Amino acid sequence: MIETLKLLGIKEKPAQVYSALLSLGSSGVKDVANKAGLKRPTVYVYLEELLKDGFVQKIAIRKKEYYQAISPKFLEIKLEQNLSQLKKEMPELELIHEQGQGRPKVSVFEGETGLNLVYEEIKKTKELLFWSDLFAVEKFFPDVYRKINQATVENKIYVREIIADTSDARASARRWATTAGEHYDSRLASGPVFNDSVIYDGVVAFFRLQQQNLFVVRIEDPTIAITMKTIYEMAWQVAKPYKYKV
């Protein structure tokens, strides 16, 4: 319940107070504090916040002040109003985000969920330029490896990849090429390559694939992407072509 109340902009401690009031009904501050497991002076502060925001109302019974939580039905109405307001302002928010005062859009996505978001995005492009430890991708994220591999054929995505010059990475490249065929070309790096990195559609993404610390840094900026692509092309020219039989 507390997490749901947070969606309405109620902070954690005030949410505890509201939840306590909801179960108690009309109550004084002492009872609310005991139920919420909070100190009485701070409960006064939280009740005033909730009162100001319309989540709680104050009533008088026999000349004594009591507090009462508003019905959850009104919370639903309030959430719908907030969502309606957000939808109304979304075009302006998107415009501000896109303009960004000339700054690149830099996003950091953490955990396996964050990595999957970016991996899903790259399946919708027409060209992918990777430099990666392909074996690490296949080992730690076999589903991602398989889905992107299939997408290269289904969506006719041309993939070039500079891979680590290891037996494991070469084996992964051969398996990739078995499905991708003419849509895939790989070359061998002259030095170590860790994790995964890719250039696509004005975006450069750097993945960290160690299980203890998974994240991806996504940089969206045409000038950075073009510059990285130029560097990639230079690296591609000097990388050793990987000849394999599919």
Image (cartoon, rainbow, N blue to C red):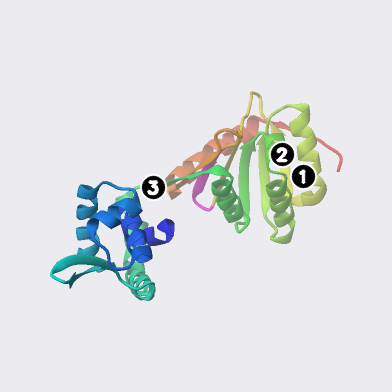
* Residue 172 percent across, percent down from the top left: 77, 38
User: Residue 135 lies in what quarter of the image?
Assistant: top right
Q: Nearer the viewer, residue 155 or 32?
A: 32
Q: Nearer the viewer, residue 1 or 245?
A: 1
Q: Is residue 96 above or below residue 109?
A: below
Using the image, tell me which numbered label, if any, was put on residue 166.
none
Provide the residue designation for mark 1.
176
Q: Quadrant of the C terminus?
A: top right
Res 242 seen here: no
User: Residue 90 lies in what quarter of the image?
Assistant: bottom left
Q: Is residue 240 above or below residue 52?
A: above
Provide the residue designation for mark 2.
186
* Residue 114 percent across, percent down from the top left: 54, 48
Proximity of marks 2 and 1: CB atoms separated by less than 8 Å: yes
Question: What residue is rendered at 61% in x and 30% in y?
Answer: 194
Q: Label 1 is placed on what type of residue?
A: Trp
Q: Nearer the viewer, residue 172 or 78?
A: 78
Crowding at label 2, few (<14), some or many (≥20) Cα neighbours within 10 Å? Answer: many
Distance from the alpha carbon under mark 3 to that under mark 1: 32 Å
Crowding at label 3, few (<14), some or many (≥20) Cα neighbours within 10 Å? Answer: some
- Depth check, mark 2 against mark 1: the one in front is 1
